[in-house]
Amino acid sequence: MSLPEHLQATFSPDEIQFIVENEPIRIFPRITTRQSVRSRHRDQITQAKCTLITSDDHNVNQMVAMQSTELPLWLALLLKQQNKCSIVAPRWLTLQSLDQSISFEKKNSDRFSSLPWNWLVLAQLLFGKAPDDFHDPVHELRSRIQDLREVRQLKVLRGLRELNESHLQLDNLSLLEINELRPFIVGTMDKLRQIHTATNPESQPHAQAQLTQQDLDEPPY
Amino acid sequence: MDISIDDILAELDRDTTAVDHSDPSSHLPIPSDGNTTMMNSSFDPSRMPGGKNRLHEDVTPQKDYSRLMTLWRNERCAPELLPYPSLLLSRMLRRVQEQMENIENISMGFYKNTISGDLKNSGVSYDKTNEKLPLLYMEAELERVKFLLRSYLRCRLSKIDKFMLYLKQLDYDETNVTPLNELLSEQEQVYHSRHFAISLKLLNSSILKHMPPELQAINDTEGSVSMIDEPEWNKFVFIHVKEPSDHANEDPLLEKNEFGKLCYTVTIHELNEDVELNIGGIYVMRYGVIKDLLRNDKVELI
Amino acid sequence: MGYYDIDDVLADSVEFPCKFQYFLPGLGYLEGNPGKPIEKNCRLDLPLWLARILAIVGGDEEGQEDEEALPFVELLRPEMFSPKVVNAIKAGASDLDLHTINAHFYSLAVKWITLFGDEELAGVVSEMVLERSLEMNGHASSVAVQAAGVEAQSSLIGSPFLITMDESEKQLYRLAHDSYKRTKKWIIQT
């Protein structure tokens, strides 16, 4: 009741977006918020200062048109919506970089490329809200992201064979990918754990090794 | 009579609204906990000329917010109820309150400025929409903070409901490490004991009083299944191993593995198995195994 | 899991074959003969919650202190854990109609393994859980998106595998499918 059931053990994708939106991103403002001493003398009307309680408000109050600065993503998207800035796409989000990532994913069957932890969410948000800020055609970028997602999903699917009652290492899996897989991975591993615990109910510290243990020291991915 | 679920939810929303206007303590200075002294957003050393005040270095609105984000995520992922961060929460609530007043003041001032600007007709051109921007940002930010607080408190409430008996039992357990008044906020304690009383009354009047006395227990743990639901301690959770703080070499838990990488070692007792957790790594682990690392802020749940 | 878990209560009411190890006067009503005794070595299906206690508690009050008294009943291996079923699991867990074998198969397997420390069964069931989970994941993650792009639905409702799932699998399927659906929906809408 106090928290809907589908949010009790995981996050909604919107909440993942909320988390990602706290991250800083580089922008080119189209407005100037920095107030020179001169203009303050010339006119009594000064713009209200923006004070923030979750992030440093220095940058947002010192913006100079066409001079790049860094803001939290949610703020940048808001400015973008008002047509007051353009967003600098991160370096990994170009056709060239994405092609490299895709080929890395294809070459390495046992690990993920080191994309940022928010790559999928960030890409989707920027495609949707700042499509005119890319140098590369957005539809091509979109299809690269889709390719990347699919090749990684295939790898995840193969990796799921390694689910066990002990633990997993999943480096470089991004937050949205984790969140999507969470119920399945946790649910299956919990079931395997329960069966294992049932074989030694007292759960002695020196329980005998048994069952079908994979080589657990090896990261499965 | 029709009662819409939306009304109930709206009611619930009001009840969990982050700022309690009737609570005078929210305007009082916050007691010191050693590294925290009175802070508010209008007096903030990090913004004062002359650089940072060392004493206050650890408390900034930014750090508080990102700490609350982490606590929210931990709370959502952890099978148990985590301790209530009372100082952090009172700072956040006070900032929300002040920001609301701040926004109100600015929007009144903005109105005046516009009028006088029009009357002056000074020829200085400025974009009126630009003037509204700071307000827009501040309101948007406020909504984000309110969402976070609300979602965090709701998550805690759902756990307090779920573990009603377990928490009650903890209260009686003198060997318990974290006393109930550190686990729950004052309001949460009131909520918990009232919820307990109401549930007990309902159970009693609907069924228990019709049963023989020996079958009236609601907290019998002797049978094959305990009547008290405990958190599922060994539930699997996703963890991210945090970068060590500046004092990494003073951390006795941190060690170097055979590849020279920094890691924490944990033991899965049931399997008699040691696992190295590399800094920066993402793992699926039994909650019980990493519980202490979580309390010590070495890992976060994701 | 837990005291108030309805699936756990239902699982506990599944009947298991038992063999009585005593002559018990007056208990004939258990096998539909009220007023008659239960003979020693009589075989009878009893719900697990009852069978479990009778299989643990010793029936001979005069039994020597140091020697464990023979329990009232001997709990016999039920059909669902018979070699026939175990072999069928080994041959292809995904093709198995688990729901027909028993709707609470997984839960009962855990209970059985806890009672008897049956490690062989634990190994077989672990393999089964993994194999069937992967099969189920394939179905759960297959989310069809309608042209409008808003409503996401499973294209596989009515797939033969889904009706073979036991209660624990159904529950996991719902959670997993829901998660895949929400994620896909978010990606399309953004």
Image (cartoon, coloured by chain):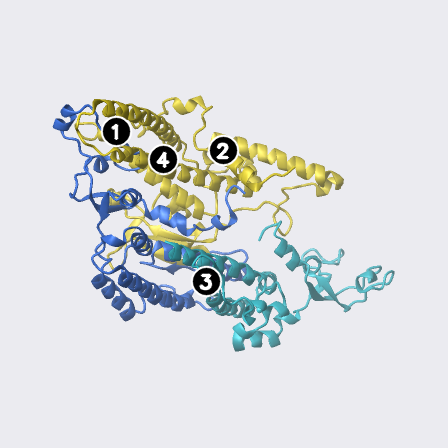
Residue B271 x/y as whole percent: 45, 59
Please identify, in this view, whether the residue under mark 3 or under mark 2 is nearer the observer.
3
Mark linked to residue C146 = 3
At label 2, counting other C-alpha atoms closer than 10 Å, the crowd grade (few under 14, some 14-19, many 20 or more) is few
For the residue marked with disc 4, what is the amino acid?
A: Leu
Residue A169 x/y as whole percent: 36, 59
For the residue marked with disc 3, what is the amino acid?
A: Gln
Picture layout, residue A102 above or below residue B192: below
Q: How far apart are marks 2 and 1 (CA)?
A: 31 Å
Q: Is mark 1 on a helix, strand or loop?
A: loop
Residue at mark 3 shares a chain with residue at mark 2: no
Q: Is residue A134 at least partly visible in the picture?
A: yes
Q: What chain does mark 2 sit on? A: B
Give the residue at the far right of this rendering. C35
Residue at mark 2 shares a chain with residue at mark 1: no
* Residue at 24 percent of width and 25 percent of height: B118
Query: Which residue in the structure is indicated by mark 4?
Result: B142
- Are dots 2 and 4 in contact, CB under 8 Å? no
Q: What chain does mark 1 sit on? A: A
Letter of the blue chain: A
Going from N to C along the chain, the mark reached first, 2 or 4, is 2
* Residue at 45 percent of width and 58 percent of height: C181
For the residue marked with disc 1, what is the amino acid?
A: Ala
Q: What chain does mark 3 sit on? A: C
